[in-house]
Amino acid sequence: MLRNLDAGSLWLPWVFPILFLAARRSDWRAAAPALVLAIGLLSFLVFDDLHDRQDPTERISWTSPRVAQPALSAALLGAGVLSMRGRVRGCGDL
């Protein structure tokens, strides 16, 4: 399953959000909704794959990249929120 989560680009899309999250770990609560979604999707994928009655290899190779895309998007959005936290002024400050 981990082999299928690389998004076709050698894990780089996962490395950047992890670096931003590690750099701003004191503000992790601002990105918590996105992180909960990403972790929840991947956890459910593991749970679902472990409960197959037959060999799940083919289904894992088919579903893992498709389920990982929204999880990766959520992680990127969470990293974006953390990277911009405190830098964006409100509309009243224009």
Image (spheres, helix red, strand yellow):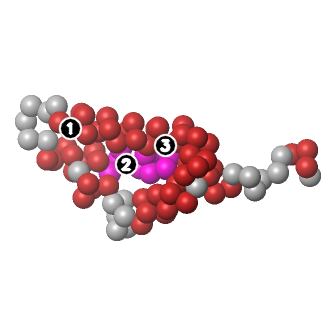
Comparing labels 1 and 3, the label whose residue is closer to the camera: 3
Q: Which mark sits nearer the N-terminus, 2 or 3?
A: 3
Q: What is the distance, in whole Å, between disc 2 and disc 3 at their CAs?
A: 13 Å
Q: Which residue ends up furthest to the left in the rendered image? A: 54
Can I make out residue 79 in this image?
Answer: no
| Magenta-span inclusion, residue 93 | no
Q: Which residue is mark 1?
A: 49
Q: Which residue is mark 2?
A: 68
For label 3, the residue is: 35
Q: Is residue 55 left or right of residue 39?
A: left
47 to 68, vertically: above or below: above
Q: Amino acid at mark 3?
A: Leu
Q: How far, Cα to Cα, is label 1 from label 3?
A: 21 Å
Q: Is residue 10 left or right of residue 91?
A: left
Q: Main secondary structure of the magenta part?
A: helix
Query: Which residue is nearer to you in this view: 92 or 52?
Result: 92
Residue at 43% in and 63% down: 15
Q: Position of residue 47 (x, y in %)?
A: 25, 34
Task: Count residues near mark 2 (Cα–Cα under 10 Å), then give few for <14, some for 14-19, many for 20+.
Answer: some
Please state the horizontal and vertical placement of residue 77, each as a whole percent of the image: 56, 50
- The magenta span reads 65-77
